[in-house]
Image (cartoon, rainbow, N blue to C red):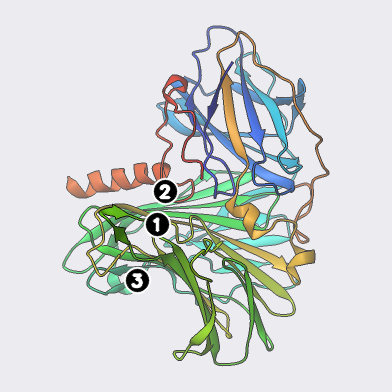
């Protein structure tokens, strides 16, 4: 039996594109294996896959997911169509795994397959003229403006709002040092195309396509996807721009978190845990990247990762904690920002692996993250640039309020599709632990311009997993054995 490994770590979900054999019978069966490889126990963790049919199938095709030949709750949603037929279907479900556990599932589809079950309650998206409202019943409600100005307008529970309404949101810093904010009405950008890609109950996804206007009538095509899984109180943001003219030096996000009282407490996942308290007017910053290239006898030595933490009055930060030398580890690239009621966890995929990355937190709740694509003062390279990050809202303290750690957000479950035998192996291994949710989530849970815009959309697919590469809708026999595992 051939096994094709199609997952990319550093996502809250594993995204897989494949071609399914043409249905010559009333139903088809396809086996997939899900593995926990980071050594972290998972409780009700989101798993996703995308099934790309070589020939579009009727919209009436049914799908269901089996474990040990028994149907389990799963969500199948068409996400790509050809006329009135379906080309690609997204699968989402939740699963609990022990560390390093592996388990197999079967996807059945066809006109005679009974439609699979879905949870009675969970996520849904409502749409107004100006915004999307993503909700998990009355327990957690997100408001996202259609122009993406501010990124998140509010994140509310019955008791509190984790956001103030005046966040700057997503921004681009250009190679000529101009700061451009996505959705800035003062620039009169053409409106974004905003749509619902997946409706719940297990997973909801929003997509925003358009051009961001830069200086001198230049634009950069942009695609943003926001994904909300039922079992976790986080949003995964994947942003890709098609920077064909080397205009983009940095991508970032600027959020205004709702914090009250003093001090503000901050944890950073650097090479080790670094924690700090901030009094009024203070800030703390984590910056990380790769050190200089050293050449000995004509041979370049591997670059060493570094990380620095500075803390102090805003604008006057002083050294606080530095990575040890010469044997530094990569910074993990996550943060907790807390008052005595709320905790917001932020994690950045591929933190400082191929760029300079930074978090900065102010005592008043302003949180900035950015990725710097400029190396040694050179002009940024032309081509797609991306940023994938999670924002997870839980009660304080996170040890009690959160079931999922930042590290597990950055380390998704691996998904592998199996083919090559007459009948997929249906055996599963390991035990399934009890599902668990966050405390406030209930268990039921232009020509050239247009061409660049199309490339940006393709680049998002290519980069959505961990903000780097892959996922081209490959046929099963074209898939390499390991897609960008790191």
Mark nearest the camera among 2 and 1 is: 1
Q: Quadrant of the N terminus?
A: top right
Specify the quadrant of the image occupied by residue 81. top left
Q: Is residue 193 visible?
A: no
Q: Where does residue 464 sit, x and y in percent of width and height?
A: 45, 47
Q: Is residue 11 left or right of residue 298?
A: right
How far is disc 3 from disc 1 in space, using C-alphas?
33 Å
Q: Is residue 296 left or right of residue 34?
A: left
Asked if the residues shown at circle 2 and circle 1 are in contact, with their CB atoms under 8 angstroms apart, the answer is yes
Q: Is residue 255 left or right of residue 215?
A: right
Which label was assigned to residue 185?
3
Q: Is residue 130 visible?
A: yes
Residue wearing tag 1: 354
Tell which circle, 2 or 3, labels the residue nearer the N-terminal end: 3
Tell which circle, 2 or 1, labels the residue nearer the N-terminal end: 1
Which label was assigned to residue 153?
none
Mark 3 neighbour class, 10 Å CA radius: few under 14, some 14 to 19, many 20 or more: few
Q: Secondary structure at mark 1?
A: loop
How far is disc 2 from disc 1 in space, using C-alphas?
10 Å
Q: Secondary structure at mark 3?
A: helix
- Residue 194 lies, with reference to residue 359, above or below; the image says above
Q: Nearer the viewer, residue 116 or 288?
A: 288
Residue wearing tag 2: 468
Mark 2 neighbour class, 10 Å CA radius: few under 14, some 14 to 19, many 20 or more: many
- Residue 349 lies, with reference to residue 111, above or below; the image says below
């Amino acid at each position: 039996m051939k096994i094709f490994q199609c997952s990319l770590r550093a996502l809250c979900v594993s995204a897989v594109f494949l071609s399914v054999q043409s249905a010559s019978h009333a139903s088809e069966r396809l086996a997939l294996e899900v593995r926990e490889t980071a050594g972290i126990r998972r409780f009700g963790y989101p798993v996703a896959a995308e099934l790309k049919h070589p020939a579009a199938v009727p919209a009436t095709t049914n799908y269901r997911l089996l474990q040990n030949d028994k149907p389990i709750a799963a969500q199948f949603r068409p996400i790509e169509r050809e006329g009135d037929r379906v080309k690609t279907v997204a699968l989402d479900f939740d699963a609990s795994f022990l560390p390093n556990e592996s388990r197999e599932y079967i996807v059945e589809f066809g006109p005679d397959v009974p439609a699979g079950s879905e949870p009675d309650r969970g996520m849904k998206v409502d749409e107004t003229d100006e915004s999307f409202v993503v909700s998990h019943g009355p327990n957690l409600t997100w408001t996202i403006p259609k122009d993406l100005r501010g990124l998140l307008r509010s994140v509310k529970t019955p008791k509190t709002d984790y956001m103030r309404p005046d966040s700057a949101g997503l921004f681009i810093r250009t190679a000529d040092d101009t700061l451009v904010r996505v959705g800035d009405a003062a620039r009169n950008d053409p409106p974004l195309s905003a749509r619902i890609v997946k409706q719940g109950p297990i997973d909801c996804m929003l997509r925003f396509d358009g051009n961001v206007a830069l200086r001198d009538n230049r634009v950069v095509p942009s695609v943003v996807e926001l994904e909300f899984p039922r079992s976790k109180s986080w949003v995964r943001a994947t942003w890709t721009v098609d920077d064909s003219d080397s205009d983009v030096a940095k991508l970032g996000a600027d959020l205004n978190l709702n914090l009250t009282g003093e001090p503000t407490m901050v944890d950073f996942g650097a090479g080790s845990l670094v924690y700090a308290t901030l009094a009024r007017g203070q800030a703390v910053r984590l910056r990380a990247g790769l050190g200089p290239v050293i050449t000995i006898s004509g041979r370049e030595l591997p670059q060493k990762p570094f990380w620095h933490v500075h803390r102090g009055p805003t604008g006057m930060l002083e050294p606080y904690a530095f990575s040890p030398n010469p044997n530094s580890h990569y910074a993990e690239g996550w943060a907790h920002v807390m008052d005595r009621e709320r905790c917001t966890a932020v994690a950045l995929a591929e933190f400082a692996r191929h760029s300079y990355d930074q978090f900065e937190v102010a005592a008043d709740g302003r949180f900035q993250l950015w990725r710097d694509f400029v190396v040694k003062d050179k002009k940024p390279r032309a081509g797609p640039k991306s940023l994938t990050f999670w924002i997870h809202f839980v009660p304080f303290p996170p040890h009690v309020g959160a079931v999922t750690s930042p590290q597990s957000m950055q380390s998704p479950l691996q998904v592998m599709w199996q083919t090559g035998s007459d009948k997929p192996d249906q055996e599963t291994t390991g035990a399934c632990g009890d599902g668990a949710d966050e405390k406030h989530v209930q268990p039921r849970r232009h020509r050239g311009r247009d061409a660049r815009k199309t490339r940006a959309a393709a680049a998002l697919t290519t980069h959505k997993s961990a903000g780097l590469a892959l996922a081209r809708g490959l046929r099963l026999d074209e898939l390499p054995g390991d897609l960008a595992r790191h």
